[in-house]
């Protein structure tokens, strides 16, 4: 965990370690409410500043699915403060409702005549490997 703080040039504090540990232990996209329940008593302003820092530095990214509250997930090590680089889909299990960021080998190419596509997101749903 110390490597993340060093590589992303983030000051390491006990609270930030605690927040990062929640993501590391869960391996899924998490709601802020879940995060708050896991870290216990805390200052809400400090939590939101920590989340903003982690997003700005390429440690976390937002996961926004239709009809779902915004969630947060760990970034790949290739993300930085300059850009988030994600080659994954967001998969929602229809049984346990957990959301996973799943790496894929190759994203499909999207071509729309007369338009330039700069980015797109792929969302999928079904049963995760724990609910099969």
Image (cartoon, grey):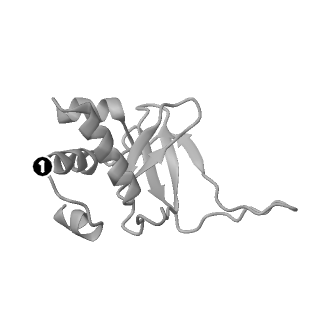
Quadrant of residue 47 within the rendered picture: top left
Residue 86 placement (x, y as % from top left): 50, 61
Compared with 40, 51 (above or below) is below
Q: Is residue 21 left or right of residue 31?
A: left
Q: Is residue 34 left or right of residue 16?
A: right
Quadrant of residue 29 within the rendered picture: top left
Mark 1 residue element: helix
Compared with 25, 82 (above or below) is below
What is the count of numbered marks?
1
Compared with 76, 89 (above or below) is above
Point out the residue furthest to the left here.
14
Neighbours of disc 1 within 10 Å: few (<14), some (14-19), many (20+): few
For disc 1, the marked residue is 14
- Residue at the location (24% across, 39% down)? 46
- Report the quarter where the C terminus lies: top left
Residue 45 placement (x, y as % from top left): 28, 35
- Residue at the location (25% across, 61% down)? 10
Residue 131 placement (x, y as % from top left): 40, 37
Q: Nearer the viewer, residue 3 or 107?
A: 3
- Report the quarter where the N terminus lies: bottom left
Residue 118 placement (x, y as % from top left): 67, 62
Q: Nearer the viewer, residue 20 or 24?
A: 20
Q: Is residue 6 left or right of residue 73?
A: left
- Residue at the location (27% across, 70% down)? 7
- Residue at the location (53% across, 39% down)? 126
Compared with 111, 100 (above or below) is above
């Amino acid at each position: 965990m110390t490597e993340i703080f060093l590589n992303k040039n983030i000051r390491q504090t006990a609270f930030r370690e605690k927040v990062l540990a929640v993501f590391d232990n869960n391996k899924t996209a998490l709601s802020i409410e879940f995060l708050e329940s896991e870290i216990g008593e805390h200052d809400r302003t400090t939590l939101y500043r920590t989340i903003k820092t982690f997003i700005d530095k390429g440690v976390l990214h937002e996961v926004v699915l239709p009809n779902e509250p915004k969630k947060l997930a760990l970034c790949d090590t290739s993300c930085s403060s300059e850009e988030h680089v994600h080659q994954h889909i967001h998969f929602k299990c229809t049984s346990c409702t957990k959301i996973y960021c799943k790496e894929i080998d190759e994203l499909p190419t999207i071509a729309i005549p007369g338009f330039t596509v700069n980015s797109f997101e792929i969302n999928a749903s079904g049963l995760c490997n724990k609910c099969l």
